[in-house]
Image (spheres, grey):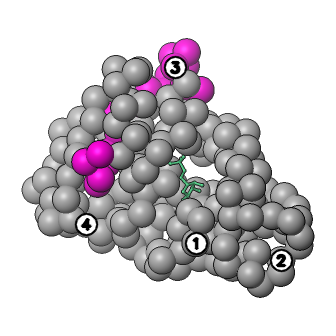
Amino acid sequence: MTKIAIFASGSGSNAENIIQYFANEAEICVKNIYCNVPDAYVLERAKKYNVPTIVFNRDELRDPQKILHQLQKDEIDFIILAGFLWLIPACIAVAYPNHIVNIHPALLPAYGGKGMYGNHVHESVIKAGEKESGITIHYVNEHYDEGITIFQAKCPVHSTDTAETLAARIHELEYKHFPQVIKEVLSL
Ligand code: GAR
């Protein structure tokens, strides 16, 4: 049995989609949701599926005796970042080499790095007049958005797009591909 932990900071629609996707999978289970925002909606979503949640602050994330220790105690094999907005500290990145995957709502290496998350990304893409955007699923190291790319998918950017309409198109791509790519990575 491969045990997954999902890290999320916000709404958690990707986290919910991943929980649903693996619900009937005998060999893969979403063990818990890790969240750095005490009132994030992802915590409500987790409750619906009886997935235990762990809420932590920045010091706890960086302290190897806290979050890393918890991951190891729960025998987590794989970490999925689904809208998680803090940098993964070196202690966790080093303990899980090629076992942490992130999704980014643009075509990296463009529109990545610190501060590039959610609608900030879409606003920058629209402002630059890009004709297409997309998603990047990549391995995670201790630098923002720099690990090896596993998968990308593209979608058009229309001249009438707002950050919200583009975000909705990107979310559809994420729901379609992210769980499948996770499954493929886990079976490597
Ligand atoms: C997703 O679009 C994800 O790609 C993005 O945050 C959104 C979270 O939505 N992640 C980043 O911007 C990371 N840099 P969700 O909470 O509904 O899954």
Q: Which of label 2 and label 4 is nearer to you?
A: 2
Q: Quadrant of the C terminus?
A: top right
Q: Residue at x 27, y 36 (%)?
A: 53
Query: What element does badge 2 sit on?
Result: loop
Dot 2 corresponds to which residue?
A: 130
Q: Is residue 84 magenta?
A: no
User: How far apart are the alpha carbons under marks 2 and 4?
Assistant: 37 Å
Residue identified by numbered label 1:
120
| Residue 168 vertical placement versus 186 (above, below) | below
Report the Cα–Cα distance between label 2 and label 1: 14 Å
On residue 23, the disc is: 3
Q: Residue at x 54, y 40 (%)?
A: 13
Q: Amino acid under label 4?
A: Cys
Q: Residues within 10 Å of mark 1 (few under 14, many from 20)?
A: few
The circle drawn on residue 91 is 4
Indicate which disc, 4 or 1, sits on the residue closer to the N terminus: 4
Which element is circle 4 on?
helix
Q: Find the magenta span and give its range.
A: 21-39
Q: Is mark 4 within 8 Å of ligand 1?
A: no
Residue 2: quadrant of the picture = top left
Regarding residue 94, the answer to whether it shows in the image is: no
**How far across and down, in percent of the image, does residue 111 sit?**
64, 77
37 part of magenta stretch:
yes
Q: Is mark 3 within 8 Å of ligand 1?
A: no
